[in-house]
Amino acid sequence: MSQFEQDIEQVEMGIDEAKRIIAEGKDAMTLADNPLFKKIVLDGYFKNEAARLALLISDPTISEAIRGYIERDLYGIGGFKRFLSAKVQMGLVAEQEVKDLGETLDEMRAEEVGE
């Protein structure tokens, strides 16, 4: 396989990977639009549970061990929310990447024909 063919293959693989990331981003957006997901996760977990834990952690009568459990739960909520947000953002970035890589692939193929 020539270097040119390898370069084409690399760009095509990049496009395939970007399309996979786009699909995950769209799946995350579909989840966010699902009424049950909104009720249980977006409202119930990200908002209500986070608020409950924040109030609980401020209680001066809880032990340090319980406070540690609550902190871990709060970190979990934040981590999960960041994970979902990142999937959406990465999908949006990947859409532009597919366009850019498609243009690169077209240019590479045009150069090959022109040689």
Image: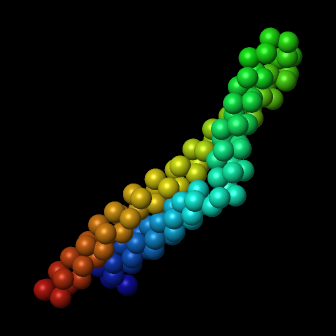
Name the image quarter holding residue 98. bottom left
Image location (x, y in percent) of residue 30 = 57, 63
Image location (x, y in percent) of residue 63 = 86, 16
Q: How is the image coloured?
A: rainbow
Task: Pick whichever, 45 or 92, lies toward us.
Answer: 45
Image location (x, y in percent) of residue 80 = 64, 45
Residue farthest to the top, as pictured: 60
Give the quadrant of the N terminus. Answer: bottom left
Task: Pick whichever, 113 or 3, lies toward us.
Answer: 113
Residue 16 in the image: above or below residue 81? below
Tally of numbered tags: 0
Name the image quarter holding residue 111. bottom left
Confirm whether residue 56 shows in the render. Answer: yes
Residue 106 appears left or right of 28: left
What residue is drawn where x is 64% and y is 52%?
Answer: 38
Residue 63 in the image: above or below residue 30? above
What residue is drawn where x is 63% and y is 61%?
Answer: 34
Image location (x, y in percent) of residue 35 = 65, 58
Residue farthest to the bottom, as pictured: 113
Residue 110 appears left or right of 81: left
Confirm whether residue 7 shows in the render. Answer: no
What residue is drawn where x is 85% and y is 22%?
Answer: 65
Give the quadrant of the C terminus. Answer: bottom left
What residue is drawn where x is 21% and y is 76%?
Answer: 107
Residue 36 appears left or right of 101: right
